Amino acid sequence: MGERDEQSAVESGADQVEPRLQPVIEAMATLRRRCPWSSRQDHQSLEKYALEETDELIDALEDFTAKPTAELRAGVVEELGDVFYQVLFHSALLDESSGHAYGHSLGAVIEGLEAKLIRRHPLAFTDDSGDEMASLEDVEREYHRIKAEEKTTLRGEDRTG
């Protein structure tokens, strides 16, 4: 993909995600185009980094939980960024392999997550609840019911797909 083509691909992906994310999507596109290490990576080569970054986030969260200081909070924020970089990188690879503009898959990830949060937590998103919080027991029962329903639906799709 030429530099001009890549820029238009980045720009056309702009409507797929929150405008605040556009600069990081463009930075990822530049890395894929101009960084010899980044340009050679694929999903498989990045697996170890996804695991490493997740482990580092868990360590940072444990440290912060034990002693919630500003410094340790900054460490958690940094590690969250590193995990997000993995999501961004894999999303860019998906975009490249499918011919979509950069940002398309990241937008799909965000939209899918939003839908899942709402679908799996209907007691929190009901119109008539106001600011009242449902009981933990009701939330857990509903969550497990929905998860079981999703698994049944997925099994049905596997047989027909």
Image: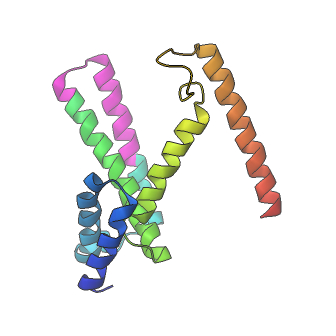
Q: Residue 139 vs residue 83: left or right?
A: right
Residue 50 drawn above or below residue 92: above
Q: Nearer the viewer, residue 61 or 150?
A: 150
* Image point (45%, 62%), residue name: 105
Residue 17 in percent (x, y) is at 37, 57
Q: Residue 9 vs residue 159: left or right?
A: left
Residue 155 in percent (x, y) is at 78, 50
Q: Nearer the viewer, residue 116 or 94?
A: 116
Q: Mark yes or no: residue 46 visible.
A: no
Quadrant where the C terminus sits is bottom right
* Image point (40%, 43%), residue name: 54
Quarter of the view holding residue 25 = bottom left
The magenta segment: 52-72
Residue 148 drawn above or below residue 157: above
Residue 26 in percent (x, y) is at 25, 66
Q: Residue 67 vs residue 137: left or right?
A: left
Residue furthest out toward the bottom: 2
Quadrant where the N terminus sits is bottom left
Magenta segment includes 60: yes
Residue furthest out toward the left: 71
